[in-house]
Image: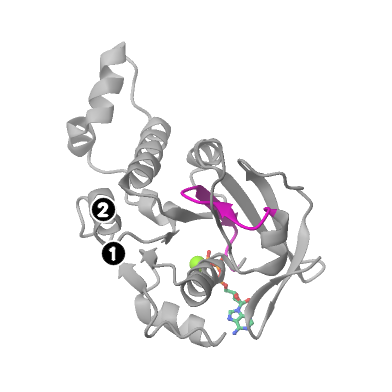
């Protein structure tokens, strides 16, 4: 069955993934600090809006809209007049972050969404024990019988539910930014759950950056690490 692909606008990356991410897919972009994850997200939304008139939504928890726009400006990406919304949520204040994001997606109906980062979303945990207990998932786990609820189980359950609810909210192609080395077990769950995984690295000894497509469902791709650099127009993946 034919389906649409959502091009990233990063030429070599699009070639690797047969033209783009399958429409409606969930993609994990993972890497340590400073591996260009946020720039990747901004470039994905900017290229989509500029080249394809795709509506975009940038969901952030730590970096504010001004800082994101300032970073984008450095590469000449002006979001004024483009159908892109920046949503900055305060994790410490919003009791139902998941519900809010899902409702924003349903209202705005973006073609592309960036969640920066899934790790920040999860860092809201652990909540108080009472809040856990009031949650349906944990009620269900308890019914299994006598299993102590570990933080790992909670994180995995919440990640699974969040990604599923975002998927059900519409047909958006979603890039989830994941900060490496945090919530290891949740990360593994995410990697199985999502449709695509892109790993961004920096090799300090060589002063080089690389990008590799570790997984992309419905796509024939290689998993060779490509050198990636940052130029005046953002990320460039080399052949
Ligand atoms: N104008 C620029 N020109 C060249 N390189 C830049 C420019 N702006 C930022 N960078 C590089 O990009 C890096 C930041 O990229 P980005 O914010 O996308 O990282 P990140 O993976 O999101 O990091 P974190 O996990 O800390 O949020 C900087 O450390 C710097 O190396
Ligand atoms: Mg970032």
For the residue with label 1, is its CB less than 8 Å from the closest atom of ligand 2? Answer: no
- Mark with earlier residue (2, 1): 1
Location of residue 200 with respect to 125 vertically, above or below:
below
The figure's colour scheme reads one colour
Whether residue 30 is in magenta: the answer is yes
- What segment is highlighted magenta in the picture? 17-34
- Horizontal and vertical percent position of residue 181: 56, 50
Ligand 1 visible in quadrant: bottom right
Q: Which mark is residue 158?
A: none
Q: Residues within 10 Å of mark 2 (few under 14, many from 20)?
A: some
Disc 1: which residue: 89
Location of residue 139 with respect to 3 vertically, above or below:
above
Location of residue 175 with respect to 131 vertically, above or below:
below
Mark 2 → mark 1, Cα distance in angstroms: 8 Å
Seen as rendered, the residue at the extreme top is 145
226 sits left or right of 60 in the view: right
Between 184 and 37, which is closer to the camera in this rendering?
A: 37
Q: Which mark is residue 97?
A: 2
- Horizontal and vertical percent position of residue 150: 38, 29
Query: Would residue 202 be seen by someone viewing this image from the given angle?
Result: no
Helix, strand or loop at mark 1: loop
What residue do we see at 49% from left, 74% from top? 46
Between 186 and 88, which is closer to the camera in this rendering?
A: 88
Helix, strand or loop at mark 2: helix
Q: Are marks 2 and 1 in contact (CB under 8 Å)?
A: yes
């Amino acid at each position: 069955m034919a389906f649409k692909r959502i091009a990233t606008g990063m030429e070599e990356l699009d070639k690797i993934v047969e033209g783009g991410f399958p429409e409606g897919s969930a993609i994990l972009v993972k890497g340590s600090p400073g591996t260009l994850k946020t720039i990747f997200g901004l470039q994905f939304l900017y290229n989509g809006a500029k080249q394809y008139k795709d509506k975009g939504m940038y969901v952030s928890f730590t970096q504010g809209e001004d800082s994101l726009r300032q970073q984008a400006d450095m590469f000449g990406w002006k979001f004024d007049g483009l159908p892109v919304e920046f949503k900055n949520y305060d994790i410490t204040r919003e009791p139902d972050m998941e519900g809010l994001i899902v409702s924003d997606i349903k209202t705005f109906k973006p073609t592309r969404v960036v969640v920066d980062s899934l790790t920040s979303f999860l860092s809201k945990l652990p909540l108080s024990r009472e809040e856990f207990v009031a949650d349906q998932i944990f009620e269900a786990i308890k019914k299994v019988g006598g299993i102590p609820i570990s933080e790992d189980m909670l994180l995995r359950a919440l990640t699974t539910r969040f990604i599923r609810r975002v998927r059900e909210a519409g047909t958006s192609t979603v890039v989830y930014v994941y900060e490496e080395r945090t919530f290891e077990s949740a990360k593994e769950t995410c990697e199985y759950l999502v449709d695509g995984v892109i790993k961004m690295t920096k090799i300090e000894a060589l002063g080089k950056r690389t990008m590799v497509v570790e997984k992309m469902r419905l796509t024939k791709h290689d998993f060779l690490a490509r050198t990636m650099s940052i130029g005046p127009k953002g990320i460039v993946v080399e052949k």
